[in-house]
Amino acid sequence: MHMIAVSAVSIIVHMYSLDAVDARILLARDSSREASLIEISSRLGISRNTVYARLKRLGEGGALGPPSGALAPAAVGRPLLAFVTLSVSQQEIDSVYAAIRAIPEVVEAHTTTGDADVMLRVVARDTVDLHRITQRIQLAPGVQRSSTSIATTEVVPHRMGLLLRELATI
């Protein structure tokens, strides 16, 4: 169990810890997204019920995000990726969180250490659309300063496969 402090509110995340069997199941799903539970269980030599129970537990335990999380932003007309850092008034942090949650193009947000307080992953149609989005972010109550960097080339896409392969061999 991990405790994540969020302003005045604390969220408790019950994270299921993966083992080698879980890793093998997830790698099998990665290699063939359309594979049924029966196909995965046959390929891995474990029962369909075990595959089902493991995937269900991973989902309920917070280890698996929603399927839409794997969707490429370009598929919904937002091919431009930018990272926006915010410096915010700590007294108004809840207002900042509420404001950025209400912006659909903010697809990820994290509190951070260092020079910025919050880092956002933002997707946009183009630079004009990005300007509209960053203006909306900057108008949020509590945002004092922002900095935007546009991603030009994806060098390493979001991945977990290498870590899963390592876990699967333990």
Image (cartoon, rainbow, N blue to C red):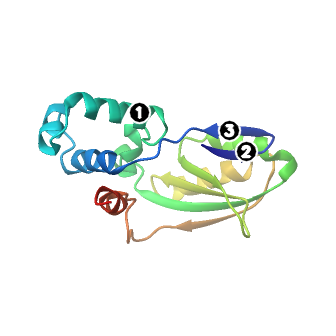
Which quadrant is the N terminus positioned in? top right
Q: Identify the mark nearer the N-term, 1 or 2.
A: 2
Residue pictured at 37% horizontal, 30% vertical:
56
**Residue holding disc 2:** 6
Describe residue 28's horizontal placement relative to residue 19 as left or right: left
Q: Nearer the viewer, residue 131 or 61?
A: 61
Residue linked to disc 1 = 57
Q: Mark 2 and mark 1 in contact (Cβ < 8 Å)?
A: no
User: Looking at this rendering, what residue extends furthest in the front direction?
Assistant: 170
Image height check: is 120 above or below 99? below
The one nearer the camera, 132 or 165, is 165
Q: Can you identify the residue that label 3 sits on?
A: 11
* Alpha carbon distance from label 2 to label 3: 7 Å
Quadrant hosting residue 88: bottom right
Q: Give amino acid for label 1.
A: Arg
- Amino acid carrying mark 3 in the image: Ile
Secondary element under disc 3, as helix, strand or loop, is strand
Q: Position of residue 58 (x, y in %)?
A: 41, 38
Q: Nearer the viewer, residue 60 or 127?
A: 60
For label 3, the crowd category at 10 Å Cα-Cα, with few meaning under 14, some 14 to 19 and many 20 or more, is few
Total marks placed: 3
